[in-house]
Amino acid sequence: MKIFVTGTSGYIGGSVAKVLVDAGHEVRGLVRRRESVGSHRQAGIEPVVGSLDDAELLGSIANWADVTVNAASSDHFWAAHALIESLSGTGKTLIHTSGSSIVGDDAAGMYASTVVHADDMPFEMMLNRSPRNEIDRLVRSAGIHRGIRTAVICPTMVYGRGLFEKADSDQIPKLQKKSAQAGAGVYIGEGKNIWSNVHIRDLAELYVLAIERAPSASFYFAESGELALRDVAGAVSVSLGLGGNTQSWSVDDAVAELGLWPRIALGTNSRVRATNARRALGWVPTQPGLIETVSNNL
Ligand SMILES: NC(=O)c1ccc[n+]([C@@H]2O[C@H](COP(=O)([O-])OP(=O)(O)OC[C@H]3O[C@@H](n4cnc5c(N)ncnc54)[C@H](OP(=O)(O)O)[C@@H]3O)[C@@H](O)[C@H]2O)c1
């Protein structure tokens, strides 16, 4: 198949593109930095230099492709809008990437029992999460009303080495940086808050399954386990040779240093179950868990 992937110089998009090339697909990747052009060509990904803000470019490559995977941003409304407008009525496939902070709270390190068990289970959303969710709804709705086969994949805390240009994910590397400075694995408050997680290889396989068989307008959380952030901090500490020692960080100090990230991610609960991925797509995660992967720098 001809597949257009956005964000291929990034962690998720690059990993998905690599798996698709390895499976024999013809892949074009959107890159905004010319430095990435050479590595893309070497990996068999045809680079398209441009930005998510260029609606015309997005539309023309999406129309070249049989399938478009938007993995550059969960939050760029106009890119999702442009892809939908240009693909409308074509019957082609659009897979969009969301993120499980849509179910997050503002717990500052405290435990919460809420788990979104089924991907289509209604859940109460904090106001600051709704813009991302509105994009997910736009994409899914286009899968019903606009003559496009759409699906949304919603990754949780992604860990493991990326498969292409960008090896590092988001949350674990930020935690490692702060923990290296602190001399101990850090967590917010009591560190009892819990995040679901997924290995990058398992996540990339989920995109392949969604491309092959997702019914239109469907939604998939991607998770294969969950951990309290205090335990994640322990693994981070081991990965840095800090003996598993951990240390609490107050949410106010963390916000003063890092901005809102501790309140929208690190100190929050984001607990989901990949029910649709397992039941509807037959997804079976096979990769090692987060503790093993991070502790051993795998
Ligand atoms: N990693 C996770 O654990 C995780 C979990 C859930 C959801 N998500 C969400 O999934 C999305 C991708 O995550 P990621 O970890 O792969 O991020 P990433 O490593 O930062 O990759 C983002 C990619 O998109 C490209 N990009 C961003 N804005 C662009 C623009 N305006 N025009 C063209 N290209 C643009 C980046 O290009 P450059 O290389 O030029 O920067 C990069 O290739 C993000 O929205 C993230 O919030 C991530």
Image: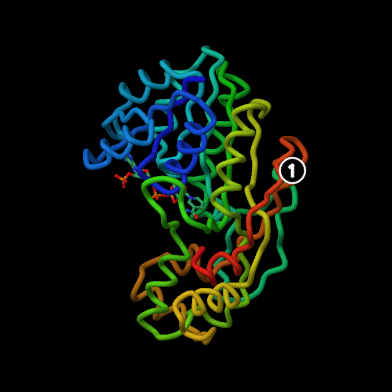
Which residue shows up at 45% across the image and 57% down it?
169
Which colouring convention does the figure follow?
rainbow
- Residues 240 and 49: in front is 240
- Residues 57 and 47: in front is 47
Please determine whether, in this image, residue 253 is positioned above or below residue 131: below
Which residue shows up at 22% across the image and 38% down it?
34
Counting labels gives: 1
The kind of residue tagged 1 is: Arg
Left or right: 230 in relation to 40: right
**Kind of element beneath mark 1:** helix
The percent coordinates of residue 136 (x first, y second) are 55, 38
Q: Name the residue under label 1.
A: 278
Please determine whether, in this image, residue 105 is positioned above or below residue 61: below
Which residue shows up at 72% across the image and 67% down it?
113
Left or right: 202 in relation to 252: right
The percent coordinates of residue 68 (x first, y second) are 48, 27
Please determine whether, in this image, residue 2 is positioned above or below residue 6: above
